[in-house]
Image: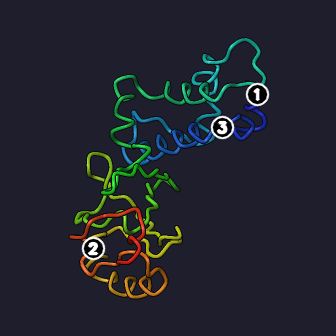
Amino acid sequence: VPVAKTQGLDTLPWSKEALTLRRRLAWLHQGLGAPWPAMDDDTLLATLDDWLKPFLKGGAQLNQIPAHVLIEGLRSTVPYDLQRKIETLAPTHFEVPTGSHIPIRYDEGEPVLAVRVQELFGLATHPAIANGTIPLLLELLSPAHRPIQITRDLPGFWKGSWADVRSDMRGRYPRHVWPEDPANAAPTARAKPRGT
């Protein structure tokens, strides 16, 4: 993969899944250190022959590398006994009270959950990953998927600024439920039925 070595990792055909895996592994390395592998450009470029070359068939052209090859290569950098823990510690999705599986973004090393606020009704504890030890940064969204609040403390938000957000949202989205006590309300992914 001499082209990648001279022109950088951006020349590789990164799929969304491969980029997500790289961010998740970078987050695990940042938080837990070795033996979780570093995922920065310099490290990956310096070790290209170890993690990518073994998965390439013959003289594969960059644009012909299948997406799964980068994923397999990145996974190979993780010690075998830790590979199963990737899903447990740094999952790709979080199940909210409505049952929806919302994708987690690993931005700048921080896990972020962007979710419509109504889907979190009934949740009295802050969502966390890594066996409940790392709180997710919540981007709470309106029914139109616009950010209305960012928080690392959902119970505090329910007790505090929710009242202001609620009064604003009730005026903008009257067809949606805006309970006074969201921690004890039923979660929903829908608008109110007509006539209610």
Name the kind of residue labelled 1 in the image: Leu
- Crowding around mark 2 (Cα neighbors within 10 Å: few <14, some 14 to 19, many 20+) is many
Task: Report the residue at 35% width, 67% height from top.
Answer: 152
Alpha carbon of mark 3 to alpha carbon of mark 1: how far? 10 Å
Q: Secondary structure at mark 3?
A: loop
Examine the image and state in which quarter residue 74 appears: top right
149 vs 37: above or below: below
In the image, 116 versus 91, the foreground residue is 116
Task: Report the residue at 38% width, 72% height from top.
Answer: 192
Which mark is nearer the camera, 2 or 3? 2
Residue 2: x %, y % from top left: 76, 25
Read off the residue under disc 2: 182
Is tag 2's residue or tag 1's residue first in the polypeptide sequence? 1
158 vs 111: above or below: below
Task: Report the residue at 31% width, 69% height from top.
Answer: 153
Residue 172: x %, y % from top left: 49, 84
166 vs 154: above or below: below
Read off the residue under disc 1: 62
Name the kind of residue labelled 2 in the image: Pro
Marks 2/3 in contact by CB < 8 Å: the verdict is no
The answer to whether residue 89 is left or right of residue 66 is left
Q: Secondary structure at mark 1?
A: helix
